[in-house]
Structure formats: C-alpha cells, structure tokens
Amino acid sequence: MSIELRGIHKTFGAFVALDRIDLEIADGELVALLGLSGSGKTTLLRIIAGLENPSGGTVQFFGHDARSLSVRDRKIGFVFQHYALFRHMTVFENVAFALRVLPRRLRPPESTIKAKVHELLQLVQLDFLADRHPSELSGGQRQRVALARTLAAEPKILLLDEPFGSLDARVRQELRQWLRRLHEQLRITCVFVTHDQDEALELADRVVVMNGGKIEQIGTPQEVYHNPRNAFVASFLGTVNLFHGRIEDGRVFIGDTRLEITSANRHARDGRAMLYVRPHLLEIDRSPRGISSFPATVRNVNPAGPQVRVELTAEWGDRLHADIDHERFHKLGIQPGSKVFLRPKESHVFIYQI
Ligand code: ATP
C-alpha cells in the first residue's frame, strides 16, 4: 500500500473540513478525489503532502507513519493548477532546476542532468521546445513542463491539484488522455483533485466521491457511475432524471404508473422514494409498451451531438430528458408537441428511500 489514511479529521476553528476519512491507495494507482467546491479535496491532498497537519488520524506511506518521515523522505511531487515556472529560465532549465538544487552529494554530473532532462521532455513530448521560455508556451504546454519538472525529482507519489483547471475544455480533454498514457508508462502512484466528473471517470482507476468533508463512495469509475451508493453520488456523476415515487407492497410507482422493477428494489421498504434514471436509459415510444410506460410531451429536440437530446414534460408536469440515437430519432419522427410514452429501462433505475 502506498498511502493509508485512517480516521483523518480536520477542523478550522469550529468548522469540520474533513470528517474521519479512511482511504487506502495502492502502489501505482491513479486515484481521483472528486467533489464540489468546498468538499475538502484540497485539504485532504495537502494533508497527504504534509503541507497541512490533520487534527486527528494517521497518514502512512509505504507502511511508515508520515510523522516519522521528513518531507524529502516522503518523495512526493506536487503539481498545482497554476504552477509557477521560472519565467527567466528556458524549459530545459526549468526541468533541470529540480536536479541542480540537490545537495552536492546527491546531484548528478552535468552530462547526466542533460540526458535526464531531455528524457523527461521527450516523455511529456516537449523536447522540441527545450530552448523556449514559459511565456512562449501555451497553457497546456506549461503544465506539461511543470509535470516534467516535478518528475525530475523522481517522486514515489504524485499529487495533482486541478492540474488542468485553468485550461480550456479541448486542451483539458487532450491532456487527460495524455496523463493517462503517461501514467500507464510510469506506473507512479497518483492522486489528483478535480471537480470535473468526466475527468475523474475517464482518467482514474478509482474515484473517491467527496461531499461536505466526508467520503460518499469509493469505487472504480464503472462502480460509482452504474452503482451509486446514494442519491448524492447518482446525481453528481452525470445527468439524471429525478422522479418522486413511492413503494407499495414492494412495487414501485411514479404517479399511477407502476414500474416493472424487480432487481433494483429488493431491499426497499414501503414509503416515499426518489427514483433516478439516466437520460440514455429512458426509452421513447409512440405508443405504450408494457405497464412501465407513461405519457409525456416533447418540448424540444437537439440533434447536434453524438446522440439526440429530447426534452420532455411528463403528464404530471416534471421536466425530463432522454438521449436517443439518431436512427431511433428519425424512426420516431418526433418534434416539439409530439405525444410519446417513456419507459425507464428496468435494471438501471436507482431508488433511494426518503
Ligand atoms: P475547491 O474545489 O473549491 O478547491 P475543495 O473541495 O478543495 O474546494 P477545500 O479547499 O479542501 O475544498 O476546503 C474545504 C473547506 O475547508 C472549505 O469550506 C474551506 O472554506 C475550508 N478551509 C480550507 N482551508 C481553510 C483554512 N485555512 N481556514 C479556514 N477554513 C478553511
């Protein structure tokens, strides 16, 4: 185990920023801390880095209590959202800096420094820009130089705090894929903070969903997306349609419509319930299909994308949306005002009792 956090608690005055966090991160894992602003992600990352002391709990690195390790022994690299590169130094010199500041007995000879810097710049695919200054680079290139500079110190653990936060959507997307490939190559333990669900789901081996200083769920992207433990995780990870329903004799109802759900409500008690259905799991038909169908009216359609987004109003007034493929859209021939029937696909309805 690379990192083991036990009962981490952090208060600022009376405010509880982290509430008994337990988390284990395996060697070579890429873990995302995902949550809304203020959920405690950065505080947790700073505690792992040793930049902040927890009010309670323990941090272990490779089986050793963090308190017994100096910052240098922790071998942690940190990349921030705005990583200040040295403006007066070239890209090459910026990366070499981490090696040149080593104590004399640890500092490699100049020829080794040169070879290593070029190797790192090749790794981040920027060797051709070695002689440029940071002001002559794009934001994405600057972050890659920042990462190369951090990697030069050979960290055993890499911590990234919203590393692509200040970049535009397209560059973020590219850098995500690039970081994933880099991680596959290096297999270094990485923990990164993000508030971007897509980034976490695409990049991480495991996602830690945080809310109000607590962990709501830890799991693979597939687990947290397809089996969200609670309503917060279901609605935070991707778009959902929300239904106010009820359970009677183990049967699930929305309004007068009884849903044919058997698997999802195995443990459900009778009473009020919230039902969550992802837009691509809401089927549209022109006539009722099975007892789970309920009437709705199309309000708007947006075919500009890989799927067609259809906005609807259920007969009881709730606003919903469904994502369907283009072929199905043309077959249905729907437009604003069309009367249709909706049907949630059985096994993917999340039910939370209230
Ligand atoms: P963001 O995405 O906005 O950076 P976050 O999830 O990283 O948010 P943190 O920065 O960890 O959240 O902050 C968690 C909570 O702790 C916030 O409510 C914040 O105001 C509070 N907090 C953080 N640092 C301090 C501090 N030094 N003093 C007082 N409160 C703090």
Image (cartoon, rainbow, N blue to C red):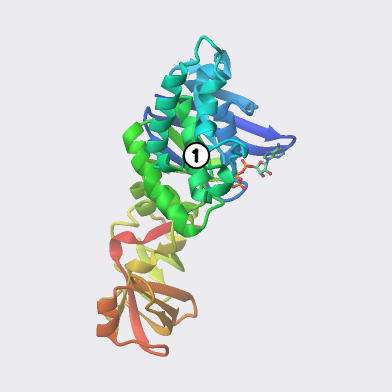
Side of 202 where 86 appears, left or right: right
Identify the residue shown where x is 35% and y is 32%: 186
Say few, some or many: other residues with alpha carbon within 10 Å of mark 1 (under 14 / 14 to 19 / 20 or more).
few
Residue 105 location in percent, x, y? 51, 9
Residue nearer the viewer, 342 or 136:
136
Taking the view exactly as shown, the residue that stands out farthest to the top is 105
Q: Is 287 located above or below residue 100 in the figure?
A: below
In which quarter of the view is residue 17 placed? top right
Q: Please give the name of the residue rendered at 49% of the width and 49% of the height, measured from the top-left corner.
A: 140
Q: Nearer the viewer, residue 317 or 125?
A: 125
Q: Quadrant of the N terminus?
A: top left
- Name the residue nearer the viewer: 130 or 275: 130
Q: Is residue 96 above or below residue 245?
A: above
| Residue 193 visible from this viewpoint | no
Q: Quadrant of residue 128?
A: top left
Residue at image position (42%, 54%) is 173
Q: Give the residue at mark 1.
A: 131
Relative to 339, residue 343 above or below: above
Q: Indicate the amino acid at tag 1.
A: Asp
On screen, residue 351 above or below 189: below
Picture quadrant of ligand 1: top right
